[in-house]
Amino acid sequence: MTIAHEEAVIDSAAVDAIFAEARTANSFAGEVSEEQAHAIYELTKFGPTAFNSQPLRVTYVRSDEARAKLVGTLSPGNKAKTASAPLVAVLSYDTAWHEQWDKFLPVYAAPKAMYDVNPELAAATGNNNAHLQAGYFILAVRSLGLAAGPMTGADFAAIDAEFFPAGDQKSFLVVNIGQPGPDAFGEAKPKFAYEDVVRTV
């Protein structure tokens, strides 16, 4: 038991499954149902984002043709595990996320103007908040009893050309999803201690 287990309002098994004992898997088995895929997003969407913007977009890759295209864009060490994972998600952000302001924050539209006139700010905000949502996505996967294998070893420009040729989305993460397969986990890697990272001012 750690202080995290003692202070959490969820039970110790949930703390372990989502945080303390969860590991990045490098091989996968089993199946991921459409219901589970749906549930991953249903949990992800509740995490906070700036202005409730929710810029994350999820592309589940299931067909053999799409999988082959995706695998071709990955770093060599990521190809085999992605080819065999039950489900793969490409995470991206909507490049025009602020154009849906009337859907995600209709009661307070004033800030939209600063994004309309500043494409760089709009892109940075979309990218940053989608990355935030990616963390929720991984925790959602774990909360369903599945393992996640997030990867940045990819040619994301090539992924965008294959999957988002209109330029309406920019990809930034590929996530393998499934039950852990044989030898899915290597040695546990060290984590920084509270004293190494946190200060109070």
Image (spheres, helix red, strand yellow):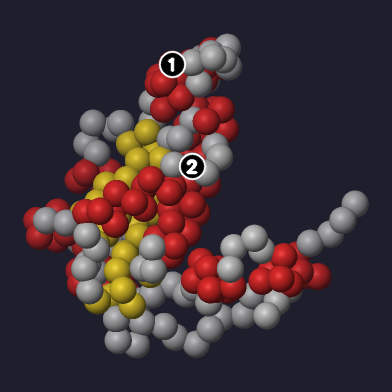
**Number of marks in the rendered image:** 2
Q: Which residue is mark 1?
A: 102
Q: Amino acid at mark 1?
A: Asp
- In this rendering, position of residue 199 left or right of residue 135: right
Find the distance from the CA under tag 1 to the CA under tag 2: 18 Å
Crowding at label 1, few (<14), some or many (≥20) Cα neighbours within 10 Å? few
Residue 146 sits in quarter: bottom left
Q: Are marks 1 and 2 in contact (CB under 8 Å)?
A: no
- State the quadrant of the N terminus: bottom right
Placement of 176 over or under 158, stated as above or below: below
Crowding at label 2, few (<14), some or many (≥20) Cα neighbours within 10 Å? few
Residue 17: x and y in percent read: 49, 71
Seen at 54% across and 37% down, the residue is: 49
Residue 59: x and y in percent read: 27, 47
Seen at 81% across and 70% down, the residue is: 195
- In this rendering, position of residue 120 left or right of residue 28: right
Helix, strand or loop at label 1? It is helix
Does residue 171 show up? no
- In this rendering, position of residue 61 left or right of residue 195: left
Seen at 70% across and 76% down, the residue is: 2
Closer-to-camera residue (9/85): 9
Seen at 79% across and 62% down, the residue is: 198
Q: Which residue is mark 2?
A: 46
Does residue 2 show up? yes
Q: Nearer the viewer, mark 1 or mark 2?
A: 2
Q: Which mark is residue 31?
A: none
- In this rendering, position of residue 25 left or right of residue 8: left
Q: Amino acid at mark 2?
A: Phe
Residue 197: x and y in percent read: 75, 65
Placement of 110 over or under 140, stated as above or below: above
Closer-to-camera residue (116/133): 133
